[in-house]
Amino acid sequence: MPDLEKRIEELRAELHRHNRLYYIDASPEISDFEFDQLMNELIELEKEHPEYDDPNSPTKRVGGDLTEDFETKPHRFPMLSLGNTYSKEELNAFLDRVEKGLGKAVDYVAELKFDGVAISLTYVEGKLKQALTRGDGTQGDDVTTNIKTIRSIPLVLSGREVPDLFEIRGEVVLPKADFEALNRIRENEGLPLYANPRNTAAGSLKLQDSTQVAKRNLDCFLYSISSDSVPFDSHWEGLTKARTWGFKVSDTAKLCLTRDEIFNFIEHWEKNRKDLPFEIDGIVLKVNKIQAQEELGFTAKAPRWAISYKYKAEQVQTELESVSYQVGRTGAVTPVANLKPVLLAGTTVKRASLHNADQMALHDLHFGDFVYLEKGGEIIPKVVGVNLKKRKEGSSPIEFIKNCPECDSELIRKEGEAAHYCPNEYECPPQIKGKVEHFISRKAMDIEGMGPETIDLFFQNQLVKNSADLFDLTKEDILPLDRLGEKSAENILKGIEASKQIPFPRVLYGLGIRYVGETVAKKLAKAFKTMDALSLAGKEELEAVPEIGERIADSILQFFHLESNKKVIERLKVHGLNFEISEKEAPLLSNSLEGKSIVISGVFNLDRKELKSLVEKHGGKNVGSISSKTSFILAGENMGPSKLEKAKKLNIPLVKEEEFLNMIEEE
Ligand code: IVH
């Protein structure tokens, strides 16, 4: 073996070993600096010598590969769910069933129920080959590239008796501290916050850029091995073996011989779960012996030898100090409870959503009430009840406001809707700001260099009240503002200038006409070709456009009727925004693909984006996944096996790139 190859292998082995010492065994032998040096040496060598590439090289942990489509692949063993219990009685009933089924008392393994995303890892000859999400239980999404960035998942196994082929399942979790750090960054950047660690972990696994995944500090606990033949006869032994092979198996798992031990485990973790670095939502109990498991078998959905016991959501009580009202971008008014600060599930809570007037009425809230709080799926906790015993005598009920807290307009409530709205769409501050934010957003004008907080700053300083004001901004306007230096000012102005190239349909979408989303904007642009024509169109003309009904037509008419909107549009026109559909977009090059739904899959000579646009230019529709409605698949090289299989099953024709080009040429 050439020296070079030897050095590469040596580095890989060393890095795998140190990775395990650090992330699994928590007993590192070298400093982070030394680790980074080894890693950098390997990265360099691999870059210079791609012929020695290894899909399981430690360098894959840094990320770098992109996944455009997460391919769906079958699970070799179905990924089942678990039956749930919520009380001691229900759990005792499960234990009775098990013991009756087996004719004797048995031992169990109690584990934490990690609140994360289930993952199934396949190892072949000791190497990680594939990682699938649960999906529908029979097939999941291939997220291997992203999974490789998780440091606690071994890419190469060590130890004895590693089966040649096996799957191991576990849960990918985002530690609480990392979740909160991520949200702090988002808060600073004015981005919407993530709801909870579980959803964030799930979203992370579906990021296209694995470098971003690598930065998320995801962790993974493994808890179950499936294989045609396993080299152990109890679950407990399996966990122990998995640990020796290099997997992270939680040391909280406990072998329980009696019911008392099981209930002690449950109580212990109910009390102490707040101190764990990650979230759990209960415990899982599994019959220990594999033979006993086999005897009990499965129902259609879940094993009969395992069950979960779910903890109740944590509840606290605190005093309601006042209720304030938030007006959203659409004018919807949300009541918010301001509370005496209280600790709930690890964070201090000062505010809670009351949702709407009905919810408020349901609780019959009075000033000074003591309310119960719970954390649901959202970041903002919710008020779930009132402690009537503590209601102060003579306190008065809280009534929903009648006027907008921002602009004093009288609120309205549409029939059949729960929310109250402020109807002052074009003058109420949060609504105006919301419109400008929408205008600059990625799918509309895509103005780089600014976000909601910049808009807020412009608004506070009375520089921007509508989208046209953006185009009057000068460097002198921006420079005196807090936090905006020379460079930011230049970027903002550059971004604004560049947006003048944005095609007409997106400009139209950016205006934020109610009910005119991306698709409707495209349809309108195609039908009327210019802003002038659209603004002059009558109701009948509007309704003649496919898929435009009365509701949308009325909203468009109302928009162009308003004097303030007319002025903004006139100014945008003067600034040179695209107010008509360009040659490129319209008319269609041909109708050869009209009514056809096309899935593009594989690798092509032409750029994928180019192909997608060709489909549209010839009247076809691009769709993401294969269904019985798919007309054909534009199939390149190396199309994924699961897509191929699905196409075959549904009898959907495959069209090669050349054939496709001929198809549209002919017209
Ligand atoms: S065992 C056939 N063990 O809970 C048994 N699941 O509600 C398969 N989960 O889909 C699951 N912690 O995603 C098992 N220690 C644990 C678990 C666990 C969390 C999740 C898992 C499963 C879900 C079922």
Image (tube, rainbow, N blue to C red):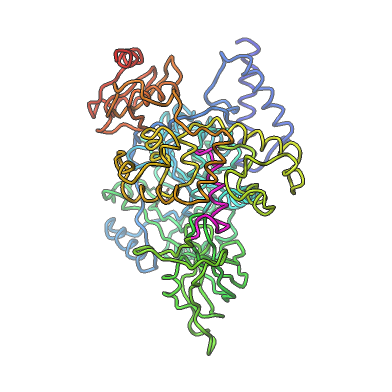
Horizontal relation, residue 258 to residue 315: left or right: left
Answer above or below: position of 301 versus 346: above
Which residue of the protein is positioned furthest toward the bottom in this rendering?
393
Identity of the residue furthest to the left in this view: 651
Of residue 425 and residue 485, the one placed in the foreground of this image is 425
Residue 519 is situated, as x and y percent measured from the top left of the image, at: 39, 39
Q: Where residue 526 sits: x, y (%)?
A: 38, 32
Q: Residue at x 52, y 32 (%)?
A: 502
Instruction: From the viewer's perspective, tell me whether residue 495 is left or right of residue 386.
Output: right
Image check: 377 left or right of 479?
left
Viewer-proximal residue among 505 and 340:
505
Q: Quadrant of the N terminus?
A: top right
Q: Quadrant of residue 460?
A: bottom right
Q: Is residue 285 magenta?
A: no
Residue at the (40%, 21%) spot, across then down: 611
- Residue 449, placed above or below residue 431: above
Q: Is residue 586 above or below residue 474?
A: above
> Relative to residue 660, is residue 437 drawn left or right?
right
Q: Position of residue 303 (x, y in %)?
A: 32, 50
Q: Residue at x 68, y 35 (%)?
A: 491
Q: Position of residue 218 (x, y in %)?
A: 56, 43
Nearer the observer, 409 or 65: 409
Quarter of the image for residue 476 reads top right
Question: What is the magenta range?
Answer: 424-445
Count of numbered circles on the image: 0
Residue 246 in sight: no
Q: Is residue 283 visible?
A: yes
Q: Quadrant of the C terminus?
A: top left
Image height check: is 579 above or below 266?
A: above
